[in-house]
Image (cartoon, rainbow, N blue to C red):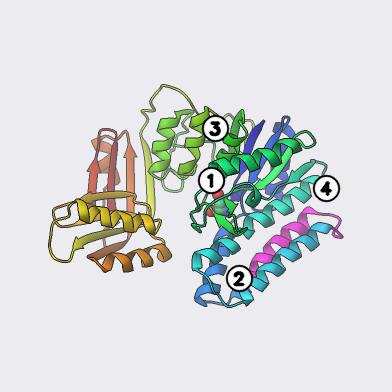
Amino acid sequence: MQVFKFGGVSVKDAISIKNVANILKNKANEQTVVVISAMGKMTNKLEELVNSYFYKSSDSLLIFQEIKDYHFNIIDQLFVNKDLLIVDEIENVFLEILWAIEEEPSNSYSFYYDQLVSQGEILSTKIISAYFNEIIISNKWIDARGIIQTDNSYREANVDYLLSKELTCNQIIPLLSNYNIIITQGFIGGTSENYTTTLGREGSDYTAALLAYFLDAKQIVIWKDVPGVLNADPKYFKNTKKIDELSYHDAIELTYFGTSVIHPKTIKPLQNKNIPLFVRSFLKPDDIGTVIKNINKRNTATSYIFKTDQLLISIQPKDFSFIAEENLSLIFSMFSKNNVRVNMMQNSAISFSVCIDNDKYKFDNLLLELQTQFKVLYNDNVQLMTIRNYNQETITKLSENKIILIEQRSRNNYQMVIKEME
Ligand code: ASP
Ligand code: MG
């Protein structure tokens, strides 16, 4: 069997969903587990909904209505026969969301985040599964919350591999004798108390990799709007090149530094079982794309990884003492507790500098905690540029008209935190 993953862009409207149907008709000639994300930008919209609900920052009902209209508009375009169970089913999901946001919050932000944001995946998979059945692509919908079991670290839940493997095999394997296609959600899981969790933004790839690992899949295909893994993000760079083949090792390095085509957690389960991962274009489904597999060749092409909206924090002991092991260990425990990932770090005698993604909620909590022990300064709106297989020329070109705040180089990797010149 194989696992396919379709992200938000590939199911952003009725035309795109029809394209996915064609890909399945042509490529799913063997048992296929299909992992699907929320449609289009719905995860961001649902985040807005959570923020407006929790912080009472704007009108939740308006955002709610926007999300509802978006989905019903797609339903209208997909289904000819409107008198369908799916309409009631989707109405019910929205009714539950509405009830949830009408109640006063009595739990943490992260808890509500997961209960609400996860609905994007529930909605998309329910609609798509019903549509596929309607056009006779027979399939079975599975609730990922019943197979991907996690702890209750909301927004960044940790998967219980053993239990999830058991549940996945018990539920999916028997179905595969009756259905060629199983449809489930990426990104979401469930706790032992039946609450919903999420695995971190863009976590659907990770779900797909987990399912491939549990089910001993022959391959996994991530269908994207780009031709494969590129050496730079076409959003920021001209003349990008596709990388045809990558070793698991190179893929982990690239995703670790922030290559956005695949989620960083995706590679490890696949590498453990030697399952090849293909990144292919849903716009040109016959092109081969990139394959990530067990090869011995090191990728020597220069890759550029650019992260915007970064924070550069400088942490100093209040008493002017040195940044030494005890301080570092305290600092790291605070980062880890707040689930903040370090993108780059550097230390001097009395200051420790860290570059992180600007996530307001996480940073506010981290800052409060750091400030109890340290003096904290920070620069927002900075960018992090990583160059794999760099040379001086590439560095000079990319730092033109920029202020370099900190930089660091190892044998293969160069990183700089930069700011635009005023
Ligand atoms: N829908 C989620 C997100 O946008 C998960 C994913 O797409 O991978 O973050
Ligand atoms: Mg998404």
Q: State whether residue 175 is above or below residue 110.
A: above
Tell me how many marks there are: 4
| Category of crowding for the residue at label 4, using alpha-carbon neighbours closer than 10 angstroms: few (below 14), some (14–19), many (at least 20) | some
Find residue 259 and report its image quarter.
top left
Marks 3 & 1, CB-CB < 8 Å contact: no
| Real-space CA distance between mark 3 and mark 1, rounded to the nearest whole angstrom | 22 Å
Q: Which residue is mark 1?
A: 160
Q: Is residue 264 left or right of residue 66?
A: left
- Check disc 4 and give the amino acid type: Glu
- Check disc 3 and give the amino acid type: Leu
- Check disc 1 and give the amino acid type: Asp
Q: Secondary structure at mark 3?
A: strand
Q: Which residue is mark 4?
A: 134
Q: Which residue is mark 2?
A: 63
In front: mark 4 or mark 1?
A: 1
| Category of crowding for the residue at label 3, using alpha-carbon neighbours closer than 10 angstroms: few (below 14), some (14–19), many (at least 20) | many
Q: Which of the labelled discs sits on residue 277, or is there none?
A: 3
Mark 4 or mark 1, earlier in chain: 4
Q: Residue at x 33, y 59 (%)?
A: 334
- Check disc 2 and give the amino acid type: Ile
Please provide percent x and percent y for residue 298. 38, 25
Mark 2 or mark 4, earlier in chain: 2
Please provide percent x and percent y for residue 196. 59, 58
Q: Is residue 399 left or right of residue 336?
A: left
Taking the image as drawn, is residue 405 in sight?
Answer: yes
Q: Which segment did they paint magenta?
A: 64-84
| Real-space CA distance between mark 2 and mark 4, rounded to the nearest whole angstrom | 30 Å
